[in-house]
Image (spheres, helix red, strand yellow):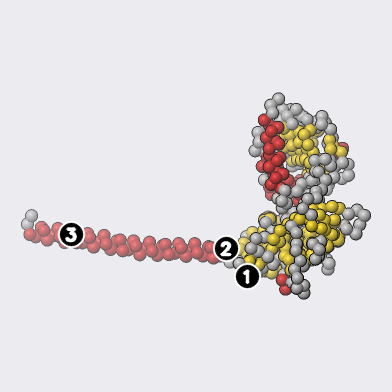
């Protein structure tokens, strides 16, 4: 190769090399800029979507101001909340954004039942709570909750320390985890119940429930200050507050408030062994009492023939869309639908005898739980209606279920339902799973 050709080749290689280096530098700068911009956008999204815990109040009356908690998700760029969830201890109850108010100054959030929160479109969380059926409304207010830690103990004050921590007791009395309780203790018609209460680990919050023969009072949550315990729950139907006085001898006294008009005294004593009546022996039926009824599907009106003894295990649920314990039982029965050769039917007894008037209320529960088994409209929930339709006696509670084997033999009737807020829930559901599996394994 001639000298001038070598020079041209070296020059060409040098230009190519510097061009490649320049291109790489430009790409690196562009990538860095783009990555930074993308990260900033991601950071901005994370920053803009904020969750907030609120201490909420509904004033039902001068005697009863219900305290509960809400969690909201809201974007800085939005004038209203993206999501609202009611919190009762371990329970999370998401509300459904229904619509804007007619004058666009309010947003409406639905509970699974016939009730709503109407909120003003503002940075604050306030408005009113509405019972759709009765048109009753009650003022609703809230303020941001402050969660802190002190000596590794999380402070969640559902009941404000400033308002409720006014005790002067120097000695804190022991508090049992389980009580035998007498509700309506000043009445001849008192009612026995079991109270279960525990302090959440590494927290100042107490959780629990109160169980009766018809069901439980669902998720109770609150705080203890000195020798007083304050608990509440709210799900759109249950609006309960319990004020509990802890005595030196281990007994308790107190008052239970419900909604705007009801309150009752109660007493209790520490008790780890007492039980309520056996839920399998309260409502009874004849062993060979088959079911053969025709009812309309709640929404379409299509007539469904419900008949036992046709080769499938059959579970019949007596329920109502207005019943929170029925909601808990329905959520569990949804799991059971996974079994082949198990038929599940819900008979919905509603507040109206007219199916068209009841569709909306039932559909809210069906949609909320995404129920996967037939819901049949059974008429109005009134005295004697269930016994007239089904071969059972001494019906006391919504919900109640009847379980039949493949041949149509009545295996059991279970009155009431104690749900996931209770300590016996896991054991009960495990046993029913096992019982159904045994019935399915028995071929005709």
Which badge, 3 or 2, comes first in the chain's sequence?
3
Label 2, secondary structure: give it.
strand
Badge nearest the viewer, 1 or 3: 1
Q: In 3D space, how far apart are the residues under numbered discs 3 and 2 (Cα atoms)?
A: 55 Å
User: Which residue has dot 1 on it?
Assistant: 150
The spot of residue 153 in percent (x, y) is: 63, 66
Q: Is residue 108 visible?
A: no
The spot of residue 208 in percent (x, y) is: 73, 57
The spot of residue 383 in percent (x, y) is: 88, 44
* The one of 83 and 215 positioned closer to us in this rendering: 215
Q: In 3D space, how far apart are the residues under numbered discs 1 and 3 (Cα atoms)?
A: 72 Å
Q: Which mark is residue 12?
A: 3
Badge nearest the viewer, 2 or 1: 1
* The one of 336 and 443 positioned closer to us in this rendering: 443
User: Which residue has dot 2 on it?
Assistant: 49
* The one of 338 and 142 positioned closer to us in this rendering: 338
On-image quarter of the N terminus: bottom left
From the viewer's perspective, is residue 88 above or below residue 396? Answer: below
Residue pushed farthest front? 249
The spot of residue 108 in percent (x, y) is: 71, 59
Q: Is residue 430 visible?
A: yes
* Residue at 56% across, 65% down: 48
* Residue at 74% across, 57% down: 177
Badge nearest the viewer, 3 or 2: 2
Q: In 3D space, how far apart are the residues under numbered discs 2 and 1 (Cα atoms)?
A: 28 Å
**How many labels sit on residues?**
3
Label 1, secondary structure: give it.
strand
* Residue at 71% across, 36% down: 435
Which badge, 2 or 1, comes first in the chain's sequence?
2
């Amino acid at each position: 190769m001639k000298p001038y050709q070598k020079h041209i080749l070296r020059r060409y290689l040098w230009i190519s090399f510097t061009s490649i280096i320049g291109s790489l530098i430009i790409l690196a700068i562009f990538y860095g800029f783009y990555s930074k911009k993308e990260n900033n956008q991601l950071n901005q999204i994370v920053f803009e979507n904020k969750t907030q815990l609120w201490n909420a109040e509904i004033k039902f009356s001068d005697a009863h101001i219900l305290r509960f908690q809400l969690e909201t998700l809201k974007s800085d760029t939005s004038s209203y909340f993206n999501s609202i969830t009611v919190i009762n201890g371990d329970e999370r109850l998401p509300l459904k954004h229904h619509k804007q108010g007619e004058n666009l100054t309010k947003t409406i959030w639905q509970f699974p039942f016939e009730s709503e929160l109407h909120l003003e479109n503002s940075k604050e969380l306030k408005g009113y709570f509405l019972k759709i059926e009765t048109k009753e409304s009650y003022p609703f207010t809230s303020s941001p909750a402050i969660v802190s830690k002190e000596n590794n103990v999380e402070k969640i004050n559902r009941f404000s320390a400033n308002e409720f921590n006014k005790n002067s007791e120097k000695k804190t009395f022991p508090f049992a985890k389980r009580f035998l309780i007498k509700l309506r203790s000043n009445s001849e018609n008192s009612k026995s119940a079991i109270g279960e209460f525990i302090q959440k680990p590494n927290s100042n919050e107490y959780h629990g429930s109160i169980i009766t023969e018809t069901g439980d009072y669902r998720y109770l949550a609150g705080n203890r200050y000195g020798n007083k315990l304050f608990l509440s729950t709210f799900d759109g139907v249950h609006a309960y507050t319990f004020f509990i006085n802890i005595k030196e001898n281990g007994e308790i006294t107190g008052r239970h408030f419900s909604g705007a008009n009801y309150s009752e005294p109660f007493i209790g004593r520490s008790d780890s062994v007492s039980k309520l009546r056996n839920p399998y022996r309260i409502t009874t039926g004849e062993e060979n009492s088959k079911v053969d009824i025709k009812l309309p599907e709640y929404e379409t009106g299509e007539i469904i023939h419900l008949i036992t003894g046709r080769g499938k295990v059959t579970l019949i649920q007596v329920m109502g869309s207005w019943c929170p314990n029925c909601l808990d039982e329905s959520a569990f029965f949804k799991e059971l639908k996974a079994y082949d050769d198990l038929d599940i039917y819900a008979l919905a007894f509603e507040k109206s005898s007219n199916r068209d008037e009841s569709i909306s209320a039932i559909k809210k529960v069906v949609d909320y739980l995404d129920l996967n088994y037939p819901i049949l409209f059974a008429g109005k929930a009134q005295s004697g209606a269930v016994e007239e339709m089904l071969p059972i006696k001494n019906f006391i509670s919504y919900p109640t279920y009847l379980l039949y084997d493949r041949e149509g033999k009545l295996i059991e009737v279970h009155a009431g339902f104690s749900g996931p807020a209770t300590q016996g829930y896991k054991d009960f559901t495990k046993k029913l799973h096992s019982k159904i599996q045994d019935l399915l394994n028995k071929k005709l």
